[in-house]
Image: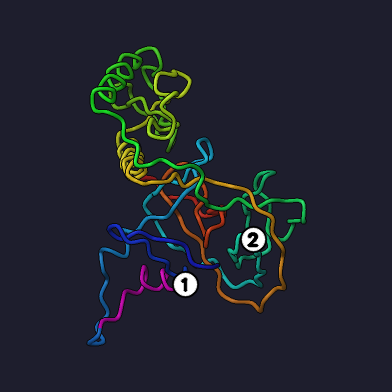
């Protein structure tokens, strides 16, 4: 499978998944030939599509898995992205998840793209505080005495859950006071999602999903294949600009 973007600090970096697997499990060789297991390797994030908001978010990697040796095929999006994957690996299309080998010319691939200008829009502190107060007032009516986090599925008592805006306030202010846009979330998931939203608020554009046409190219010889386990409830990640399924489930926290 091709590389995907990773972030280190504020720098977006691409790394091939086979190289990431090697660093993750075997360490990194430094200039003196020593093998070092760097914490930064396991502190990386993958870009994940929130399938409700159609915006990309960042979630921590849980594992990098070597899946075996298989014949690969190559998909090319008209927007320029290439993806090499096995024939049975699901990719996201305008008709949902479809195995790469079953794609036909009528299917449109889901890729990342700039969706709307934001001009660095920020939510005024007083308005954000008011939204927070209103949201807290909805807890008793919208969170059951024992409920589940809509992001990871963990079951907790009401006191350990918060209400989260499914569509972020920074993405759509009109949904800020919409109870239909509120769902229970555990503190770790809420914190991770909030951090991602704060990054989003500082960008000049919203990175969202769009559909593009594709063509399937020739297959290639058999080689090792890999997959990612990513924290969170969205079972996908961005691979060289295209949304693919992470067929390896993330481990519980």
Quarter of the image that includes the N terminus? bottom right
Estimate the x, y position of residue 136 in percent, counting from the top left.
30, 18
Observer-nearest residue: 128 or 29? 128
- Residue at the spot of label 1: 18
- Residue at the spot of label 2: 77
Residue 44: quarter of image? bottom left
Residue 232: quarter of image? top left
The label nearer to you, 1 versus 2, is 2
Task: Indicate whether 241 appears above or below 221.
Answer: above
Estimate the x, y position of residue 2 in percent, counting from the top left.
53, 68
Which residues make up the magenta segment?
18-30
Task: Indicate whether 7 appears above or below 206.
Answer: below
Disc marking residue 153: none
Can residue 101 be found in the magenta stretch? no
Q: Describe the element under mark 1 as helix, strand or loop.
A: helix
Residue sitting at x 44%, y 44%? 206
Mark 1 closeness class: few <14, some 14–19, many ≥20 residues within 10 Å: some
Residue sitting at x 40%, y 31%? 149
Q: State the residue lying farthest toward the right.
A: 105
The alpha-carbon separation of the residues under discs 1 and 2 comes to 22 Å
Estimate the x, y position of residue 243 in percent, counting from the top left.
56, 53
Main SS of the magenta part reads: helix
């Amino acid at each position: 499978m091709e590389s995907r973007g990773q972030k280190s600090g504020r720098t977006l970096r691409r790394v091939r998944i086979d190289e990431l697997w090697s660093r993750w499990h075997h360490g990194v060789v430094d200039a003196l030939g020593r093998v070092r297991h760097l914490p930064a390797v396991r502190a990386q994030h993958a870009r994940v599509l929130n399938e409700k908001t159609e915006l990309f978010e960042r979630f921590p990697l849980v594992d990098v898995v070597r899946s075996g040796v298989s014949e690969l095929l190559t998909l090319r999006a008209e927007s320029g992205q290439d993806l090499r994957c096995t024939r049975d690996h699901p990719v996201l299309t305008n008709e949902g998840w479809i195995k790469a080998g079953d794609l036909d010319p009528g299917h449109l691939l889901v890729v990342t793209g700039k969706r709307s200008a934001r001009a660095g829009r920020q939510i005024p502190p007083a308005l954000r505080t008011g939204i927070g107060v209103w949201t807290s007032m909805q807890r008793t009516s919208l969170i059951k005495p024992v409920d589940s986090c809509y992001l990871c599925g963990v079951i907790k008592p009401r006191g350990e859950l918060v209400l989260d805006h499914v569509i972020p306030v920074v993405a759509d202010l009109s949904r800020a006071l919409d109870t239909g846009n509120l769902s229970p979330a555990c503190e770790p998931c809420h914190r991770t999602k909030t951090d991602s939203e704060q990054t989003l608020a500082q960008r000049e554009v919203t990175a969202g999903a769009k559909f593009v046409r594709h063509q399937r190219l020739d297959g290639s010889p058999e080689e090792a294949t890999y997959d990612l386990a990513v924290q969170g409830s969205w079972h996908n990640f961005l691979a060289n600009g295209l949304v693919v399924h992470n067929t390896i489930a993330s481990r519980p926290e």
